[in-house]
Amino acid sequence: MTKNESIGLALRIASIFLVFYVLEKAAATIPGWGRVGEVSTTAIVVMLVVPLVFAGILWKFAFPLSKILLPPATQITEDIRWSLTDIEATAFTIIGVYVLSSAIPDGFYIASVFIQSSTFKADLGQVSITSRLIFIIVRLIIGFWLLLGAKGLHDFLHKVRSAGKRV
């Protein structure tokens, strides 16, 4: 696999993540579609269609874009040797970053809703907030697991546990 091909593959993976993003946002917005006005419907359609179009363009033109992204000096046709372990580690790291990048903003949102509901004594569906909070915590755990791997997560937790101890 050449450097151009590996960058093209990364761009195609990014387009797949954009499709996942659109599916996640569509699942959250389509159930409430009938309650929004005409302007909101247009905004929702634009927010769902633009990433899909961008993902399609990214998928279709991934390899020509990789030639543009790489400087001419690095576009040598020599093969890059990737072992199966390297490919797995890279793929799981990318998936972990995606899971974390989608879970962290949701966590801040749910935490702010939870704080507002407890501050103003409003009933915003505590079961829904609690279940979404648990869902986000599980996504964070899975994201860290994928990002760091089993050994990396073990080493990270060991360092956290032994932080502050004198050796």
Image (cartoon, rainbow, N blue to C red):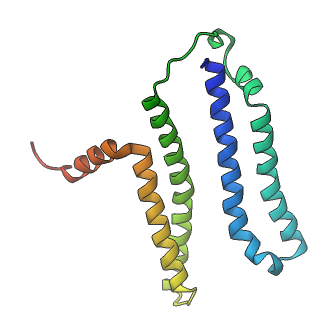
Q: How many marks?
A: 0
Residue at screen point 13% across, 49% down: 165
Q: In what quadrant of the picture does the N terminus appear?
A: top right
Residue at screen point 39% across, 44% down: 148
Task: Using residue 38 as the reference point, say whether residue 67 is left or right of it.
Answer: left
Can the viewer see residue 64 in this picture? Answer: yes
Residue sitting nearer the eye, 59 or 133 = 59
Residue sitting nearer the eye, 83 or 125 = 83
Q: In what quadrant of the picture does the C terminus appear?
A: top left
Task: Using residue 41 as the reference point, say whether residue 14 is left or right of it.
Answer: left
Looking at the image, residue 87 lies above or below residue 28: above
Can the viewer see residue 115 in this picture? Answer: no
In the figure, residue 64 lies in which quadrant?
A: top right
In the figure, residue 149 lies in which quadrant?
A: top left
Residue at screen point 83% across, 79% down: 34
- Which residue occupies the extreme front position in the image? 84
Looking at the image, residue 154 lies above or below residue 68: below
* Coordinates of residue 112 in the picture (x, y in percent): 53, 72
Looking at the image, residue 122 lies above or below residue 94: below
- Which residue occupies the extreme left position in the image? 167
Residue at screen point 75% across, 27% down: 65
* Coordinates of residue 166 in the picture (x, y in percent): 10, 45
Task: Using residue 88 as the reference point, say whether residue 31 is left or right of it.
Answer: right
* Coordinates of residue 90 in the picture (x, y in percent): 49, 35
Looking at the image, residue 156 lies above or below residue 62: below
Residue sitting nearer the eye, 60 or 28 = 60
* Coordinates of residue 33 in the picture (x, y in percent): 80, 75
